[in-house]
Image (cartoon, grey):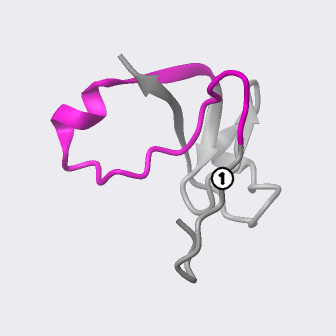
Amino acid sequence: MEANGTFTITTHERSRPGLFVIPRWDHDLYARFTRSDECLACENCGFTRQKPFEPDSTDCESCGHHVWTPAVLEDQ
């Protein structure tokens, strides 16, 4: 769901790693998702980037922020 209330739907043949958007305080739900070993996601915009790179000193190519989190895959 976009900020203006519309939906954007994209299709891919298989799921891709992305930003976990459910609040982290929901530990039970967060535990159901697998964290990617190959990608990190920008905590600001959700842009994903393949490892290896240095997350502490790398700005997001999309929004310029520099806080990265493990990208998540579909729930188990």
72 left or right of 47?
A: left
- Residue under the point 29% across and 25% down: 32
* Residue extent of the magenta highlight: 11-38
- Residue under the point 53% across and 45% down: 19
For the stretch drawn in magenta, what is the main secondary structure? loop
Q: In the rendered image, which quarter is residue 36 located in?
A: top right
3 left or right of 29?
A: right
The percent position of residue 11, horizontal first and vertical second, equals 71, 38
Q: Residues within 10 Å of mark 1 (few under 14, many from 20)?
A: few
The percent position of residue 65, horizontal first and vertical second, equals 67, 64
Closest to the observer: 58 or 75? 75
The percent position of residue 57, horizontal first and vertical second, equals 71, 49
Tell me if residue 56 comes above or below residue 60 in the rendering: above
Q: Looking at the image, which residue sits at the far bottom?
A: 4
- Judging by the rendered image, the residue that carries numbered circle 1 is 9
Q: Amino acid at mark 1?
A: Ile
* Element assignment for label 1: loop
The percent position of residue 15, horizontal first and vertical second, equals 62, 26
Closest to the observer: 26 or 16? 16
Tell me if residue 6 comes above or below residue 31 in the rendering: below
- Residue under the point 29% across and 35% down: 30
Q: In the rendered image, which quarter is residue 54 located in?
A: top right
36 left or right of 13?
A: left
Closest to the observer: 29 or 53? 29
Q: Quadrant of the C terminus?
A: top left
Q: How many marks are shown on the rendered structure?
A: 1
Closest to the observer: 24 or 8? 8
Q: Is residue 39 magenta?
A: no
Tell me if residue 5 comes above or below residue 42 in the rendering: below
